[in-house]
Structure formats: C-alpha cells, structure tokens
Image (cartoon, coloured by chain):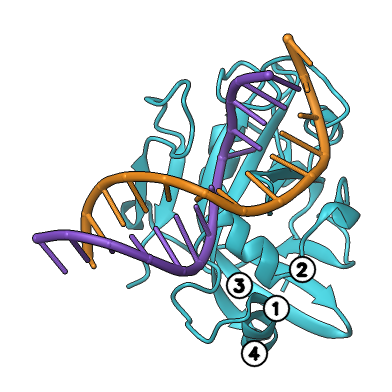
Chain colours: A cyan, B orange, C purple
DNA sequence: CACCCGATTATCT
DNA sequence: GATAATCGGGTGT
C-alpha cells in the first residue's frame, strides 16, 4: 500500500480530516506491524478556540506549526497520549487532525496485549485507547508520517461521502458547535 | 446501557 | 494553581 505523500497534508485541515477517513495507520514496533483503518477524526487549527495551537506557538504544540505530514502527539488527563497528523493550507499558521479511532487489521493480538484486554470493540475506539494499543508516546513526537518508519499512514479503502457522518467535536469546552468531526460507520 | 466521577501529570498562566 | 482534544470502573435502571 502506498504511503500518503506530503501533498496530501498540504490542504485545508478540515478537508484532510475528512480525507483521512478510510486510510491505513501503520505502526511498526518490535518487528511487528500493527495496522488499522482510520474511522474517526477531528480537525483543529490555530484559528479555533478549542485547539492547543489557538494560544500561539509553545514548546508543547510546536509540531502543529511545523511541516505538514508530521505527528503532533500530546499527553493529557494524566494518563493518555493522543495522535494528530499535522495538516494545513498556506493561509493558516498551525493545524492538526486528531486520529480518534481505528478499526484494527493486523497485529490485533499485540494490541490486545498492550491494552491488557481481549475485547475487540474497546481496543482502539478512542484516541487514548489507540495510542496505548499502538504504543504511541512522546518518543514519536514530530515523526514524519510520509516516510516508511515506526509510524506512517498509507492509502486505504475508498469511502463514499454518504458513509461519513459529520458531527460536532467532543471532549472540548470551546467552539463546541464546529462540525469538524468525521466518523466512518463500517457496521 | 446510561450516567457519574476519580485518576494523574505535563503544560501554561 | 488550574486545566485538560480521556478512560474505565462503579452504581443504578
């Protein structure tokens, strides 16, 4: 499967969020390949009060101001990591797409082991959960997702517009009405 | 299954 | 010193 190139991310953050639905997230760890179909995303830009980048560039969010196609990874609520793909057009300073959920394809047993559970439904159906399942932590901060390595994103399945559900984002207290959340309902 | 709430720490004011 | 782009366990229906 072909890796998505830089150009894929050189675009409006909200559009990239939608386009990432159906793509394949690949994590290589301990010589094992863990993959899954991206099924849920959310867009965040520096013009958006809910984004970490709204307050300006800081040590924490600097990746979102950097080159498109890299990973912005943050730690929150004392115990969770979340993965974003940096994406923005030339009109804005910073932007990222939060990968909220994936459907596991390869390496399911490894994911179950790293999560400490056997359930398939609860394995990667949340940003903190998929980060734990795929061993995503600050070691991968800023990594280039357009090159083969420990973490990258490839082409995936084609998803029709009418299979994508658009809703407001969740878990935030500002700009709660922006319809910037995209969900692919496989079942 | 729905709702409530505590955990736990990096980051910013 | 307050907050957070969350999760899971507990309780009650």
Picture residue at 83% right of the left edge, 35% below the top: A63
Picture residue at 45% right of the left edge, 41% below the top: A181
Indicate left or right for A28 with A51 as reference.
right
- Which numbered disc, 3 or 4, marks the residue that appears first in the sequence? 3
Task: Estimate the spatial distance between the alpha carbons at disc 2 and disc 4, rounded to whole Å.
Answer: 13 Å
Q: Which quarter of the image is occupied by the N terminus of chain A?
A: bottom right
Q: Is residue A20 visible?
A: no
Q: Depth check: A94 or C12 in front? A: C12
Q: Is residue A77 visible?
A: yes
Secondary structure beneath dot 1 equals helix
Q: Are marks 2 and 4 on the same chain?
A: yes
Q: Which residue is mark 3?
A: A36
Secondary structure beneath dot 3 equals strand
Secondary structure beneath dot 2 equals loop
Task: Estimate the spatial distance between the alpha carbons at disc 2 and disc 1, rounded to whole Å.
Answer: 7 Å
- Which numbered disc, 3 or 2, marks the residue that appears first in the sequence? 3
- Which numbered disc, 2 or 1, marks the residue that appears first in the sequence? 1
Q: What number is the disc on residue A114?
A: 1
Q: Are marks 1 and 3 on the same chain?
A: yes
Q: What number is the disc on residue A109?
A: 4
Mark 1 or 3: the one toward you: 1
């Amino acid at each position: 499967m072909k890796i998505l190139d830089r150009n894929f991310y050189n675009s409006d953050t909200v559009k990239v969020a939608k386009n990432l639905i159906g793509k394949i997230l690949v994590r290589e760890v301990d010589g094992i390949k863990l993959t899954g179909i991206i099924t849920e995303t959310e867009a965040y830009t520096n013009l958006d009060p809910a984004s970490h980048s709204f307050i300006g560039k800081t040590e924490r969010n600097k990746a979102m101001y950097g080159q498109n196609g890299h990973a912005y990874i943050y730690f929150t609520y004392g115990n969770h990591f979340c993965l974003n793909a940096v994406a923005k057009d030339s009109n804005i300073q910073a932007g990222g797409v939060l990968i909220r959920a994936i459907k596991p394809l390869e390496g399911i047993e490894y994911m179950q082991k790293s999560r400490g559970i056997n359930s398939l439904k609860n394995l990667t159906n949340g940003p903190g959960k998929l980060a734990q399942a795929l061993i995503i932590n600050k070691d991968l901060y800023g990594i280039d997702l357009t090159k083969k390595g420990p973490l990258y994103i490839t082409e995936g399945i084609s998803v029709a517009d009418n299979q994508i559900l658009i809703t407001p984002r969740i878990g935030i207290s500002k700009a709660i009405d922006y319809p910037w959340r995209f969900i692919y309902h496989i079942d």
